[in-house]
Amino acid sequence: MASSSSATKPTSAMSLIFFISLLFFLSISSITSSNLTNDPTLTPWPHQFHSILVMNYSGSNEIIDLWYDWTNGRNFNIIQNQLGELLYDLEWNNGTSFLYSLDSNKKCRTAQLEVGILRPNWLEGANYLGQQKVDGFLCNVWEKVDFIWYYEDVITKRPVHWVFYTGN
C-alpha cells in the first residue's frame, strides 16, 4: 500500500507541474501573438510641453523653440531663421495668431485662422504604417489625411520627426 500511494504522489505532482507549465506557456503565447497582430497605440501629446524643433524647408532652415500649452489654449513659437530675423509667434486656441519681432524693425501682424492650436490627440484616426529608423531612433510611423507622416519613438513614445507634404 505504501509503495502504491507514494507512486501516485509524484505522478499527481508531475501532472500539476505540467498543467501549470501549460497554462503559463499558453498565456505567454497569447500575449506574444496579440502583441504581434495589434498595431501600437499612438500617444497623445502632453497638455503642456517644451520642444526645440529643427525645420528644413529644402534649402531654408530654422530652429523653433516651441512652448505648447493646451491647458491654457496657447502655443508660443520663437522662430530663428538660419540667416534671418528672430520671429515670435503666439497662437491662441480661438485661431488668433500674433507674429512679431523685437529687433529694430519691430514688425507685428495678426492672423485669424479657422482652427486654433492642435489638440493633444490631433493624430487620432491616423493609419499605422509600421516601423522605420529615423535619425538613429526606431519609430512607429503613422500617416493622416494623405499629407502628414508622424514618427514616434518606439521606446519613449515621444515625437521624433514629422513631414507635412504641401505639394511642392
Image (spheres, grey):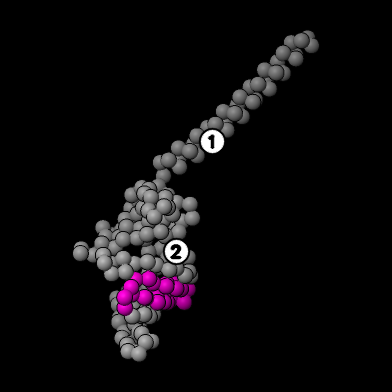
3D distance between C-alphas at marks 1 and 2: 33 Å
Vertical placement of residue 133 versus 111, above or below: above
Q: In terms of image quadrants, where is residue 147?
A: bottom left
Q: In terms of image quadrants, where is residue 10?
A: top right
Chief SS of the magenta region:
strand
Q: 56 or 17: which is nearer to us?
A: 56
Vertical placement of residue 39 versus 62, above or below: above
Viewer-side label of 1, 2: 2
Badge 1, how many Cα within 10 Å: few under 14, some, many 20+?
A: few
Residue 45, label in figure: 2
Q: In terms of image quadrants, where is residue 123?
A: bottom left
What is the three-letter code of the residue carrying label 2? Answer: Trp
Badge 2, how many Cα within 10 Å: few under 14, some, many 20+?
A: some
**Of marks 1 and 2, which one's residue comes earlier in the chain?**
1
Q: 4 or 163: which is nearer to us?
A: 163
Q: Residue at x 63, y 22 (%)?
A: 15
